Amino acid sequence: MPKEATWEDIVALWLHNKPPSTVYIYKPVIAKLRQFAKNIPPQEIDLKILQGYLDHCSRKQKPATIKRKVCTIRSLFAYAKRIGAIEKNPADALEAPHIPDELANKILVKKDILRIIAAANEGRDKVLVTLLYSAGIRASEASNLKWGDCRLRPGNKDGIISVLGKGNKRRSIRLTPEVWRQLLAIRPEDSSREDHVFLSESGWKHPLGRTRVTDIVREAAKKAGLEQHVSAHWMRHGHATHAMEAGAPLALIASTLGHTELSTTARYLHVCPDKSSTSYVSLGPVTRETKPRF
């Protein structure tokens, strides 16, 4: 690619074949960067400009959001360097803020998740929240789910859904008979295979947006009396944790969640350990001493 490549050229090639959920996140970050840099050519972007942009964002945004922006910018400029659109990668030295692992604070006990499901509005919302938890799928995967992705297992009363996850990788997830029955109960008689399962109130053919999926979970959690700022992803965390506690093999959970690395799934072992070395430490009998020992 010539060194005179424009932002539009590079971004279009970079986003090619990326899933819609990724494009949805990436594009605004680069658009804001270009606006901050007064739309100078990508070849003139340097580390100082990138750091200035991130410092500007840090005034109003959380460290986790800044970290996602850093990853996005790194990805873009690494790609631009790889295709020869720029000579040097200014994002090579870009540092992301350290984010403490807050996973343990985002795991609800099963009783609370069942309360959220019970509090969700009947019909679409209740089935949506149930599916997020029982299948462990992401908000974007639920948003993109179509009736053609749902099929009955031959000779059984349960079904299978096929979801498109990160990296455009498709995986199949088996549903329990009860969840499958609930899913079929909201299917309109005149729906086609190309119709989305979860539709917005604004139109018959308009799918429920991923942001609205989280809003529905959050509203149900609030109705259930939970004080935490619950999101749709908490249902996924709950699925992984509760399946692990029930004895599900780590590899099976990873397959269901669509994790490419077992280490990603193993995080749940650390936040909800089945065993700890504390079981092997005895305090012994409590005694009182009249003198301190040195």
Image: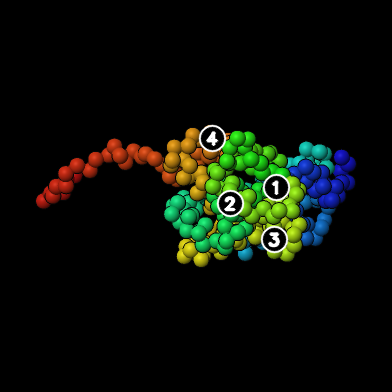
Q: Residue at x 55, y 44 (%)?
A: 177
For residue 39, side relative to residue 281 (left or right)? right
Judging by the rendered image, the residue that carries numbered circle 4 is 252
**What's the distance in space between the residues labelled 1 and 4, CA to CA?**
25 Å
User: In this figure, which residue is indicated by the disc labeled 1?
Assistant: 147
User: Which quarter of the rendering shows the N terminus?
Assistant: top right
Q: Quadrant of the C terminus?
A: top left
Task: State which tag comes first along the sequence, 2 or 3.
Answer: 2
Disc on the earlier residue, 1 or 3? 1
Q: Position of residue 59 (x, y in %)?
A: 62, 64
Q: Separation of disc 4 and disc 2 at Cα?
A: 24 Å
**Which amino acid does the dot numbered 2 rest on?**
Gln
Q: State which mark lies toward you, 1 or 4.
A: 1
* Residue tagged 2: 182
**Closest to the observer, 176 or 31:** 176
Give the CA distance from mark 2 to mark 1.
14 Å
Of the image marks 1 and 4, the number of the one nearer the N terminus: 1
State yes or no: discs 1 and 4 in contact (Cβ < 8 Å): no
219 to 114, vertically: above or below: below
Classify residue 105 as left or right of residue 165. left
Residue 262: image x %, image y %?
Answer: 54, 35
Of the residues under marks 2 and 1, which one precedes in the sequence? 1
Mark 4 residue type: Leu
Residue 200: give its label. 3
Density class for disc 4 (Cα within 10 Å; few <14, some 14-19, many ≥20) is some
Colour scheme shown: rainbow
Residue found at x 43% / y 42%? 245
Q: Label 3: few (<14), some or many (≥20) within 10 Å?
A: some
Is disc 2 surrounded by few (<14), some (14 to 19) or many (20+) residues within 10 Å? Answer: some
Residue 220: percent from left, percent from top: 54, 62
Q: Considering the numbered disc 4 on the image, is that residue within a helix, a strand or a loop?
A: helix
Do residues under tags 4 and 2 come within 8 Å of each other at their CB atoms? no
